[in-house]
Amino acid sequence: MAAFGTAAGRPLQGRGGSPGFRFTLYGALAVMIMYFDQRAHYLEPVRYALQSAAYPIQLAVNSPPSAWRWIRESLQTRDALRAENERLRARQRDLELLAMRYEALAHENGELRGLRAALPPVADRWLPAEIINIQLSGLRQRLLINRGASNGVFKGQAVLDDRGLIGQTTHVGPWSAEVILITDPEHAVPVRVERTGLRTIAVGGGDGSSLALPYLPANADIRNGDLLLTSGLGGVFPEGYPVARVNEVHRDAVQPLAQVRATALSHISSDTELMLVWFREGHPAAPAAATSNALEVKSGSAAMQPLAAPPRAAAAPHADSAARAPAAPAPRTEAPPARSATPTPRSQPQAPAADSGAPAVTPSDASAPQAEAPAQPADTPAEPPPAVPPRSRPQA
Amino acid sequence: MTVTQARVRMSLTALLALIFTVLPLPMWLDVLRPAFLVLTVLYWSINTPRAGGIGFGFVCGLMLDVFQGPVLGEHALVLSLVAYIAVREHQRIRSKPAFQQSLLVFAALIFYEFVLFAIDGWTGHPVTSPLRWLHCLTGAIVWPPAAAILSYSEGRLT
């Protein structure tokens, strides 16, 4: 045991005090930094500066792989390029065909719901970003992309690839941003089952491709092959983007909850490019106030509060009600079941539900309550409403 | 060797160690990767405790935090703690033969990972996989050659 200033520390004196003193100083500084970063979120500018200082190192580490890729791409033969061109052309034709149909469907859906015109797509603009080939902490599911605040990227932005959801940004530097994947155990994304409309939360499984659905009761209507879409709750991800496919349902007679696992649809391990998406503000399917949701949850803005006098059980705090004032919120508790049967998930039933009320279900939605019926008793315990907004965000 | 010279050398080796720490590797190799930056901090704390030691550990930890830390300051705290212990015991560690040094480094790495684990848990970002402890072993194995390389960089003045 060495007390400060005893012989143990003396040989080094003359340069900024004894080791004990200096350790006390730096330790206190580190603890203060941790406190302010974790609790008060005061250190975003410091983190920003440090990220920009780290950017040259990131580039240096990334340069050999990217140089190798550049060389390989520039040495491709003419035949390979022609084949790829051919394939892409065919794919584009297919997609155009689909998109044509999509326009018609969106229009038709809007008309069925009594809107004058179909809603515009929820994605306002998007930006491709490259993954910087760098190892962040190995056992966490994080990655670094080469877009940052200078491209307008903000904290808590949704990141997608061409197959599904990848994650959201956690720390944004000037030219780079850190992305937490949906498969990280710290990450939870609110989802709904496409087939039944059952809503729950998918927590990352921690192994790069799997997610767990830990809050489903044993009698929940879910089976292998079910597609999970984002439910639009939680304030980060918009409604209706594919997340994962259920690949394991395990029901134990003793356990009150089913053990369900799903595989993420995005191919993170083979991707080199992904998409940052900005969503149209005020669109019914857009996540509510995606820029400032961290503060909203804490301070409790009116739009995020549970309803004052719910007509039924516990009404979930609807995250997507920022645009609409919570003037007539009661019928909206009926909206989610109807939503499940919509052919295109884009246009939400919120607007018609708010003025026409829930009983006026359009004919196309008639099958919804039936499909929903077996899942209905499971709905309330399956989805603990207050847990949704905080869990959907990594606590950074 | 003056203090300034030593500081330049320390920063260069630390930068190199940081690059080795963030170099992309496949998963199975990544969990085996020794914590190069921690080894570097340990080496310089033991061999030139006058030139940096605790402050050096703090700065290295802060850089590590930017890349790996869920909370800013986590690695900074742990690395300055490790550097403090190494600086205090530097005469005892320095005089040991390589094998015993390896054992001490193993203990230091376990201590480092344990404190990190505790802080991870307290701040609500736990990684409970037992694989996180694996790098302590490889770090101890890598220590003798790493120390030899670092002492080569130091020249014959120590």
Image (spheres, coloured by chain):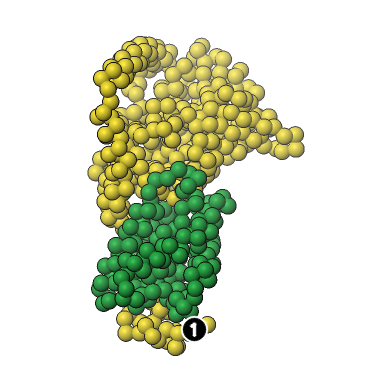
Chain colours: A yellow, B green
Q: Find residue B127 and report its horizontal and vertical position in percent.
A: 53, 51
A339 to B130, vertically: above or below: above
The picture quadrant where one finds residue B62 is bottom left
Residue drawn where x is 71% and y is 38% of the image = A255
Which residue is under mark 1?
A2
> Of A365 and A116, which appears nearest the observer?
A365
Q: Find residue B77 and report its horizontal and vertical position in percent.
A: 43, 66
> Of A213 and A23, which appears nearest the observer?
A23
Residue drawn where x is 31% and y is 16% of the image = A83
Report helix, strand or loop for mark 1: loop
Q: Residue furthest front?
A: B156
Amino acid identity at mark 1: Ala
Q: Find residue A23 and report its horizontal and vertical position in percent.
A: 41, 75
Q: Report the chain holding disc 1.
A: A
Residue drawn where x is 29% and y is 52% of the image = A57
Q: Find residue A216 and report its horizontal and vertical position in percent.
A: 62, 34
Would residue A105 be visible to someone looking at this image? yes
Q: Is residue B108 left or right of residue A94?
A: right
